[in-house]
Image: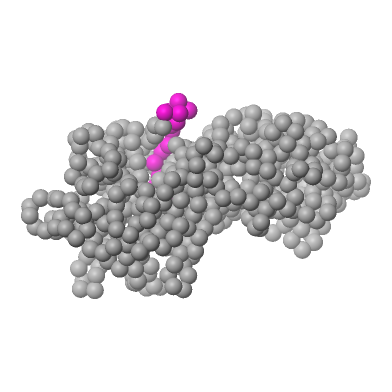
Amino acid sequence: MGKRFTKATGALSVALMGSMLLLTAACGTQTAKTLEEVNIEKDVAGNPLVGGSDSAEFNYGGDPSVLVDGDTVYLYTGNDISTEEEISNAIYNIPNYVCYSSTDLKNWTCEGEVMNMADVSWADETAAWASQVTKHYDPEQGKDLYYLYFCSWDRGSTGKQSIGVAVSESPTGPFTDIGSSLVRGAVTKPQMSNWDDIDPTVWIETDENGEEHRYLAWGNAQFYICELNEDMISVKDINGDGEITATILGGDGDIVNMQSGLESYTEAPWLYRRSDENGNYYGDYYLFYAYTWRECMAYATTDSLMDSTWNFGSMIMAPTSTSNTNHMAVFDFKGETYFVYHNGSLPGGNGYRRSACITKLKFNDDGSVEPMEETAVGISGTSSMIKTASDEYISHENYLNSTSDSDYPYSDVKVGVDMGKTDADKTWLLINGKATAYMEGVDVSENPYVSIQSENKPGLYLTVSGESIVLAQDTDASEETANSQTFKTVTGLSSSDMISFESVSNPGMYITVTDDGLALTDGSDREAASFVIE
């Protein structure tokens, strides 16, 4: 769709030409001194799914997981509240789990806290690490119950992380912990670190013989898998020796280290299998997981859980632009397959203050998974392109996000005319200006202020940096940063059929195309400071 333009004062007519809207003012070309504010219909950011705000307050939450229950999708995250001091000391402060629900994957309702770690007797009160919820019928109670599998530091397991489980009669909680860890970190082997036992994922299906299998898998650096008993809160004693023991693939144990074939496995496993239109599973099992560091996303397949090796597929998502970790959920809903992940794209976000995002996951005919880019538009947003007077597009330089922590945060990505290599490099979201959160009496739905976010580098915005305009992350969610990343849309300096972007942090200065990229100038070169929004 094109954009709707209105002037803050005076009459303005709109002409639609294909997918491009041009401004036509009654008075013709205006000078810089008589420029009028222009309200444009803002783009919609489909990502992050939740946590955003028109104020300067944000709700962060990482390690997303998803449960589809009937016609409703439930999204679960930890509640990231790490302070700047905690972040500088690499401390995750995650006191509870939060749930959101949706019936269309666009509009989300916050269902609130589903479990607080202060209520888990054996665990750390600030360590609500990754979780997954599943539903299962309880024959003793004669009804479905919901099971929250999670991980935390275990006071009773020599300082190691352990896997826990909590139960509820509702997908929105409250969930009640069973009183002790389900899998103690001291039991699994081999051991690489005290946080080997994290990031649980669960998979339930009935085999061709009518026997139900309830798989639980988890692990950092090591990948462990076991079967659960029908009660869903205890590990199945597969070898029947009266105790739960661990083994490497091929050995005689109940918890299997099934590492073979997992290339550069880091953490965040998610089990998945494809299904037909009738809900019948077919083909190989997929394991999606975090790959190497900084964390990329990858997958592997196997024809049998518990007693086979993995076949590595490929890396399917590079590190995000704003977070050192990533964690996915893969699910089917209304005939489509979706991939939920996290990044740090909200203002003030990073690897300790994360946000859940979504994109579609697509399979090739041979069952392989198509690579994906992170996206600000997601599955429900809208975007724009910014065209110069000479019919060239504004884009950022094309680059792969680095795997080196020292290269972050991105603060000086070059932007200019036709610098990108793909359409995504020249695609932007002109969203409500971030500085309006600090302005009194501004109508959020209609005002002349915009912030310009990259589509394929979410969380990075056109930013005033001295006399230059660069692409940079908002790392502190401050008023100063918001002002440097907000521009007022006014009638074009060269033509009323165009738009110019006046800096909020430097009034009277405009985004301008130069030979070296985008710069902030006084607009003397009017044509270079005038643009059309497609």
The answer, for residue 219, to whether it is visible in the render is: yes
Q: Is residue 434 left or right of residue 294?
A: right
Seen at 92% across and 48% down, the residue is 28
Seen at 78% across and 47% down, the residue is 6
Q: Is 87 included in the stretch rendered in magenta?
A: yes
The front one of 446 and 434 is: 434
* Relative image position of residue 409 (x, y in whole percent): 55, 37
Q: Quadrant of the C terminus?
A: bottom right
Q: Is 352 included in the stretch rendered in magenta?
A: no
Depicted 27 relative to depicted 273: above or below: above
Q: Is residue 132 left or right of residue 361?
A: left
The front one of 292 and 4 is: 292
Query: Which residues lie in the magenta part?
Result: 73-89
* Relative image position of residue 8 (x, y in whole percent): 79, 41
* Relative image position of residue 472 (x, y in whole percent): 62, 39
Q: Quadrant of residue 67?
A: bottom left
Q: Is residue 186 left or right of residue 523?
A: left
Seen at 23% across and 63% down, the residue is 307
